[in-house]
Amino acid sequence: MEVGSNAFQAVIGAVFVAKNFPFSLTDEWPHEWLPLQSTLTPQASFDSTTALARITNSMQLEVDYSLREYGPDHEKQRRAKVILISPLLNTSVRAREGAATASKTAARHTASEVLLAILDALAERGPAKALAVAHDQDRSVARFILAHQAAVLMRSAIPLSGWIAGQLFGLHWAASPEALLEWAVDADRLMTQAMSYDEGIGQFEKAFRAASDSERADDQARGIATELSELLTRIERLDDPGSFTRNDLDRLVRLCDIYRCMGTSDAEVTVANLIDDWTLLHRGRLTITACRADAPEVSLTGRERAVLDAVLGTLLKSAGKSAIEVLDGQPLQITFTADLNEAQRQALDQTCTLWAGVTRTLTLTSNDRGVQATIAGTYSQTGLGPVARAALAALQHRTEPYLASVADLLHDLKNQVTAARAAVSAPAQTRTARLEYQLTASRHLDQAHALAVRLNASTSSHNDDSEHTTELGPFLRSYSATVLTRLPGTISLSIPDARRIAHVAIGERTLRALLDNLVSNSIEAMPHGGSITLEWTADGYEAIVEISDTGPGMPADILNALTSGERIRSTKPGGNGLGLLGARSLLTRAGGDMTALPADSGTTWLLTLPIAPTPTRETQ
């Protein structure tokens, strides 16, 4: 038995090393060993006191217990209450006592259950409503907890994934705009009774935005990426421009419009003005139940309008006519209906699937007759509290220069493919003319191939990798060893140590894509030799990876563009800054950040990576 146990441990150890010290071997576990896995790694089960400790630790809240004993010695009863201590607020609060029990440990558990129930109420979609029938003391504790969470957000970084999993400060609702706004409006009713939080709006928005990027359903964004990948692969393999159909070209134009919309910022428009525009552009083809006199006077963002325009355009292209009904309220609803056959419904579903990934404030629901658009971001700022204003601001998209650069390349790609199709189909009177047209088509097709390969290489690294974690130290050592094999002999590389343990909430594929971009730039910047240094450090909330080189440094205009969020004009022949923009976009999507440090010489990058969360009460 002992020999078998040692052999089994040796096998597990060898696999652990061979797989580069992964956070877990669950994905590598053979199917036949599943019964053994459940025996060796049983599901964690926490008592209420431990569960409370894990949650309060993640939000920097100290916990103590007071114990009361009563009754004769042979039937002594004990009741406990939780004392929450906030170092940031420099105050504390006492919760209600838990149920009476015979033991001290059980008394602490029942007292912890009182707090967990309050936290559960705060996590409800309507926390003030959930606490409306609660004990007065419970509502006081709830306001204290919210005030402390707000103080933490205003003053320090948080373990984002841990707060989402722990259902703290409404971050777990970030995947649903309607639910997040409802939580925020209700939370304001609790919080603003105690003090003003206007100065924290910026930090609240930052947390909501990060949670929304991390938590919202990525199926729609993946749908756009999948459509792009399929089209680019088709163009890479294209030999006959004539086989690129009109439908293929329409798909390419639609992708260009989608990426342009996501990469730029268009002006807002009121619903009334939008209806006027539609009436003018599609005269005689629309039946609209709302007119300028009674249309809701609410504003739509440029992205929201673009999505609605795309839906209406698809319906009119398919059916020729459409009816539109505008329903005022919260949220605003706009219904499009038309007579559609099965093929037309499928085309409409495809449009909805792709355009729904453009904005988080608008959802599209298709049915047999058309589409219902629900717009959650039409709240008026007037009368909203600080938390609701922050949530509303977080739902508004920021322009992404990387996506605008992708749109530019897609536009160039469309032009090359269109020119190739035109050349190959042009009528030729002589054999020489036919051959010249074929040569022209071939040259345009070569340009299209080159653009497709370039786009595929850049955008493929943006496929979702958010559910994976990486142990940073071993990964950086392994990555550095790989880089050494392709470094010129005139460039040295310092390899970071792996003595510390830190698991970051980002997959190895994404990390490798980030580092490859920055290291490749460093190598290109030092044709006559130099050195590259990799260092890292971590605390309980985030890890910092520093990449520096001894090259000439980054041009000031590129550094300024990155800092201000503007488009980058690359210094490389034919470049458009897609690499740096893509690296920053990758890291932002993963909940991190990329910053260039100013220096007299050389270039230094700081990559901020979120730490992977530890189990919370959700893993019980």
Image (cartoon, helix red, strand yellow):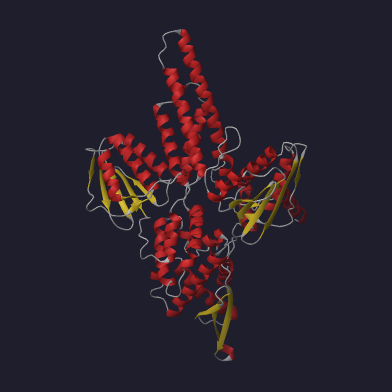
In the picture as drawn, the residue positioned furthest to the top comes out as 430
Horizontal side, residue 189 vs residue 18: left or right:
left
Q: Which of 505 and 328 is in front in this view?
A: 328
The N terminus is located in which quarter?
Answer: bottom right
Residue 161 in the image: above or below residue 282: below
Q: Which of 34 and 108 is in front in this view?
A: 108
Horizontal side, residue 551 vs residue 198: left or right:
right
Q: Where is residue 268 in the image (x, y as percent from the top left)?
A: 37, 49
Whether residue 20 is visible, yes or no, is: no
The C terminus is located in which quarter?
Answer: bottom right
Q: Which of 306 and 373 is in front in this view?
A: 306
Q: In which quarter of the image is residue 421?
A: top left
Q: Position of residue 429 (x, y in %)?
A: 41, 9
Q: Where is residue 199 in the image (x, y as percent from the top left)?
A: 48, 66
Horizontal side, residue 529 vs residue 59: left or right:
right
Q: Which of 444 and 612 is in front in this view?
A: 444
Q: How many marks?
A: 0
